[in-house]
Amino acid sequence: MSRSLDALIAQVSEVILGKDVAIRQCVTCLLAGGHLLIEDLPGVGKTTLAHALAVSLGLGFSRVQFTSDLLPTDVVGVSVYERGGGGAAGPESAGRFVFHPGPIFSEILLADEVNRATPKTQSALLEAMEERQVSVDGATRALPEPFFVIATQNPFHQIGTFPLPESQLDRFMMCIALGYPDARAERALLEGEDRRLLMKKLDRILDPSSLTALQAEVRAVHASAALLDYLQALVAATRHAASFAEGLSPRGALALLQAARAWALLARRDHVLPEDVQAVWVAVVNHRLRPLTSNGATHVAQRDAALQLLATVPLS
């Protein structure tokens, strides 16, 4: 199984060049059973990363382009009245409402530019991300397993964006930024094959049942009492830091632990080390900690503030 994970990361790295850490973070989030938010400029490979991961895992993939006129039913689906035969067959055959599933009924959903949709449409994802189900017309429908949301959002200074509320942000286990490739990776990209053609050559490394088994292994990774003490000290530091409006919630603390377990599994260990917590720290807390000094803090500024806080908490 570990070799399969290495092969998965290596294959996706052939498509998304020079972003090994970001790809490892993405796989970590998937193994931990969470959802991923990618905050970055258009054109840096966010959609390609999601698609390459879906193909490599053999999972069903849907992409929704979020726009200001997108409706919740465009995401979750809608019930449409269909006429029946009527006649002697009785009133029951006269017609009925038939539910037509939306693109959310897929194993990997790419919510592209999620902050370009209105808050009402954004909220359509809340129940799906937390409960793995959607409620439409009084009926609750389960989503596929596994179910993984990768959402992308543009920087807030761009025209036509609606900031995600804290309740929505907290549903994402991790938030990362891809950034520009370095000169070497960009040169290889310019000289290499078209990414869309390369996508057609990808192999299926894992399957849904193997992924589900790996997610179960993550939950079994051991976290010692001393490790939990360290994690709790970090969480407490966020709640008492003068530089943040509020600290991590219990959901955030659980996300930090689960992500650290997944990072340890990627390192082929059955126990969590403080280094695992530190490795996922920024990606887990960056979008949850809101600095007091600026309402429009950039991803980099928030990352720096999170790293400064991490440095203040001793290991023992």
Image (tube, grey):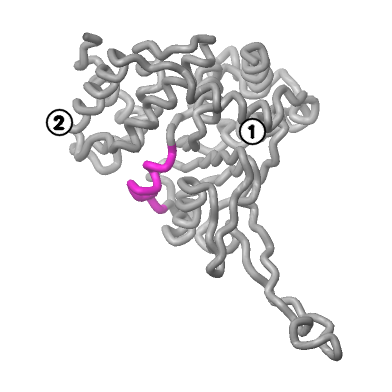
Which image quarter holds the N terminus?
Answer: top right
Residue of label 2: 240
Q: Residue at x 54, y 52 (%)?
A: 133
Q: Residue 69 location, x and y as percent?
A: 53, 63
Residue of label 1: 48
In the rendered view, tell whether residue 262 sits above or below residue 290: above
Local packing at callout 1 (Cα closer than 10 Å; few below 14, some 14-19, many 20+) is: some
Q: Is residue 164 magenta?
A: yes
For the stretch drawn in magenta, the main secondary structure is loop
Say which element carries label 2.
helix
Q: Residue 11 location, x and y as percent?
A: 68, 19
Q: Is residue 312 magenta?
A: no
Q: Is residue 187 visible?
A: no
Nearest to N terminus: mark 2 or mark 1: 1
In the rendered view, tell whether residue 172 sits above or below residue 266: below
Which image quarter: residue 206?
A: top right
Q: Residue at x 47, y 42 (%)?
A: 153
Q: Which residues are magenta?
A: 162-172
What amino acid is at disc 1? Thr
Give left or right: position of 85 versus 78.
right
What amino acid is at disc 2? His
